[in-house]
Structures are given as C-alpha cells and as structure tokens.
Image: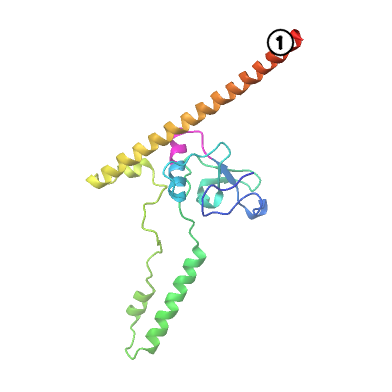
Amino acid sequence: MPQCVFKNCKNNHRNVKVSDGITFFRFPNDPFRFAEWVSIVAKERGEEFYSPCKNSTICSIHFDKLDITGNTQRRRLIKSAIPKLQIYDHTKVQSAISSKLTDDLTNQARSPISVTLMDATATLDVPPADPVPFESPDASISELISLDDTPRIDYLKQKLTRYRKVIISKSRKIHNLQKLNKRLLKKNASLKKIIKILKKKIN
C-alpha cells in the first residue's frame, strides 16, 4: 500500500487516484542516490538517522516535472531525479503578488505625491518568492564542489559526507540482518520438521 514517506505529505493509495496524476516512486537501488534521498527525507521528518523500508515511496509532487517521464499509466524518474524538500504552491505565490501590487497601487492612489512611470515600474518589480533560505536539496555534488571552499563550506561538506557514509553503512547492516533473519527462519522451520519426524519414529 503506497504512501508518501514525507511527514507533512498526506498522499497515499486511499486518497489518490490515477486520474490525479500522482505516482509513487520507490527509493533507488544505487547506494549514492539512495543516500541522497534518505538524507532529504530525514531532514524533512526531523529524524537524524531515518531508514526507509523495502516498500517506502515518495509521491511525484516532490519531484520536478522534468524529472518524470512516461504517461499516466506508466511513469518513471530520470536517473538524476532527487526529491524536493519543499512543495511550492505557485498559485498562492501569484495570489500574494497580486495582493501586494493591489495594496501598493491603492496606497499610491491615496498619496498626494504624483507617481512617475519609473516609480510604477519599480513597484511592479517584485523579487521572485522563495521563502525558505535553505540550500536546495537537489544540488548535485559537482555543484557543491564548484563553490568557494570557505572553512564553513568545507566543514559542511565533510559533515554531509560523513552522514551519507553512516546512512549507507546502516542501510547495508539492516539489509544483511534481514537476510540473516530469513536464513534463521528457514533453518528453524527445517529443525522443527526434523523434530516432528524423530518424534514419530520414537512413538
């Protein structure tokens, strides 16, 4: 039963239809991409060491449209696709900009000072909205390397690398423990059969 692992996302198989255009994607098999996805989800969930299960998924609204290929029935992600930490509602942004412009124009109309064409143009020059000042999670390693290596950036790079190694290491341990558990269950079942056979022979 697919359900988006993002804590603040309510999309799941019960409230989403195929006609809604929302698809659920599993975590990639590639260790490096897997670690990147886990790092983003852990940050969104506020969990230092988040570990997804085999069937964990992320819904398509957390990816750029250009990252998704195929039709409604069969959609896939490109290899470089990385989930976004924030869902950005462009409709709300446009509404906020329109409201701001209306307020500005109303204030100008009430003001006794005449407004020149240059002033009106400056008023309409609204900076692009991006309310969250954090670094975009889809920045690739090559983009990070291209930054000037100030002590702060260098420290953050090293810390990020350590966390990714820890995530990959823990994921492998979990995977190995799951395999070991399956083997022990099979061995236990086999021993139970042998005990039953021996009991029958004794009786």
Query: Looking at the magenta stretch, what is its main secondary structure?
Result: helix
Answer with left or right where residue 149 lies relative to residue 98. left
Quarter of the picture holding the C terminus: top right
Question: Residue 32 magenta-drawn?
Answer: yes
Q: Residue furthest bottom?
A: 112
Q: Nearer the viewer, residue 43 or 107?
A: 43
Quadrant placement of the N terminus: top right
Q: Residue 65: give x, y in percent of width and height.
A: 52, 51
Residue 173 place in picture, x, y as percent:
47, 29
- Asked if residue 40 is positioned above or below residue 200 in the image, the reply reads below
Task: Report the amino acid beneath label 1.
Answer: Leu
Q: Is residue 133 above or below residue 178?
A: below
Left or right position of 113 against 150: right
Numbered marks: total: 1
Query: Image quarter for residue 9?
Result: bottom right
For the point 34% across and 37% down, the residue is 162
Which residues, given as a range, are shown in magenta?
A: 27-36
- Reply yes or no: does residue 63 show up in magenta: no
Quarter-wise, where is residue 160 in the image? top left
Query: Which residue, given by chain and number where applicable, does mark 1 sit on?
Result: 198
Q: Position of residue 101 (x, y in %)?
A: 42, 76
At mark 1, the secondary structure is: helix
Of 139 and 31, the residue lying toward us: 31
Nearer to me, 83 or 186:
186
Q: Residue 105's x, y, as percent?
A: 41, 82
Q: Residue at x 58, y 21 (%)?
A: 184
Q: Residue furthest top?
A: 201
Q: How is colour applied across the structure in the image?
A: rainbow
Q: Within the image, what quadrant is residue 25 found in?
A: top right
Furthest toward the front, the residue is: 203
Q: Residue at x 25, y 47 (%)?
A: 152
